[in-house]
Image (cartoon, grey):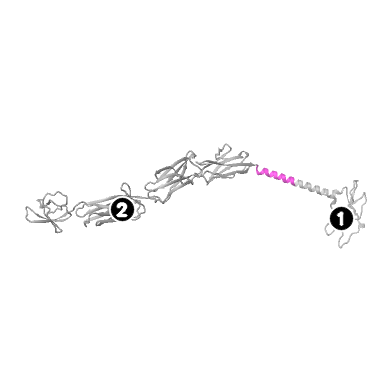
Amino acid sequence: MRVVIAVAFLELILNISGEHTNGVSLAIGQCLILHNESVAVNGLIPVNGSYLCNATSQDNPTKASVELHVIGDEESLSTSIVHTAVLPNGTLVAFRGLNVSFNCSSSSALPSRTLSWGYWGAGPSNASLASGNGAWLGLRILDIQPSDQGEYWCESRSSLSSRRTNCSTKLLVYYAPAQHPDCMWELGLDPSEVQFNCSWSGAYPKPMLRWVEIHHRPDTAAKDHLYVSGQADSLVVTLNRSMLFDGQTLKCIAEHPTLLPEEHKSCLLNLKLPFPEGNPLVTALEKTNVTLICMEASSIPPANTTWRRGVEQVEIEPGSKYQVSGSGPELHLTIYNLSKEDEGIYFCRSENPLAVRELEVFLTVKATSAYTGVIIGLFIAVLIVGTGVITAKLVYSSHDRICLGMRMEEDGGDVISLVDSEEDVFEDTVPRLPPVTNRHHTTHAEIHPIPVGDGEYVDSTETSAQQKENIVEIEDPLQLIKF
């Protein structure tokens, strides 16, 4: 005989009488075994539990007993996820890095019930993350990550009827980068305009960004001026020169649900005028090379620096005459083969969206070193000649006070004596020169021997003929002096 299990709320076509297994008799109807060997029940009260049904077959007087299991109302499930927030549409939100607990409970406590947790999402989906018998089942995820975002469901399954009941919840995982936004700028085609860009990528959902101007005033009632705001990874604002000034502070503020009230994510730009620096006076020689140096490193946004020449400020084009090069904040201008035409004023011009500032450099070109050497040589020559002339004049003016006696070597020598006579030659040594007269006369010089040996002298009366030949006639005493 084949027995069929009846379930409450099915269509009942026969009357039965049954007895509850807990010993309480219930006259709830009749059951009959049909010709197809199935059991028909009628008038069954929907009370949960198990029943015995005694049936009598019309063809076979033998009684048959069948056990009837009755399942009442549908089961209800409830879930809760701890450390999450609820959005207006009912979706749950968890922040990256938190520990999240999942709980599922059933209204039925029958041992034939099985509860399980499952997941569908961006990450690997598991048909069952956890399972167990009973009225309650828990699940815990440590350090939840964006890959854990998805739909979580709790399912209850009966082992008797294979009926399934489930409850699902969508869970989002919010996250934001730990670093502050990046504040950048980009010069437009017009040098008086600039684009300020704030970027804060790597956040979910997209952050709310705001560009504001900070007021550094003692008046606390002054509010920051808002330029633009939007929910995006980056935000751009374009400002022109009329809206900018030196010392202005622009701030980009990032707002996100994951940030606590005391947390602050932002970046600042403190605008500064350009200020080119360098040597305003430069001197160089002709036919040489010179390099003019200009430094500008303080401007925000960075300035565009160029070299210009003349009052008209004609921009210098690099070529064989000029070479423009840069090394960090320095801008060099090299001028080759200098000439007088290169002398004049040069401008180091720095421009950013705030203003234009210039450094004036005056270049002086002087004669080459070759001409300078000739001039110095002539000066030295004149100095030497002048010194010689002065020395000669001093010697000439003091000739009467010059001692003409000179001592020869120790082994012997002669003493020159000057005598003033017409023809006579004195043999004795003249102690000094006689005064000079205006009349014409002849001066004779007589050579006397110098003592030799131990103080012995040669007698002057023994003058030989050879000694007489050594007498020199001098027309003028000044002829003895030579320069």
Q: Secondary structure at mark 2?
A: strand
User: Which is the main secondary structure of the residues drawn in magenta?
Assistant: helix
Q: Earlier in the sequence, mark 2 or mark 1?
A: 2
Q: Which residues are magenta?
A: 367-383
**Which residue is at the front of the view, 334 or 133?**
133
For residue 424, which numbered disc appears in the image? none
In three-dimensional space, the C-alpha distance between marks 2 and 1, rounded to whole angstroms, equals: 139 Å
Q: Position of residue 154 (x, y in %)?
A: 27, 52
Residue identified by numbered label 2: 81
Circle 1 residues within 10 Å: few <14, some 14–19, many ≥20: some
Q: Amino acid at mark 2?
A: Ile
Residue 337 appears in view: no
For residue 415, which numbered disc appears in the image? 1
Q: Position of residue 283 (x, y in %)?
A: 62, 43
**Which residue is at the front of the view, 264 or 448?**
264
Q: In which image quadrant can residue 138 be found?
A: bottom left
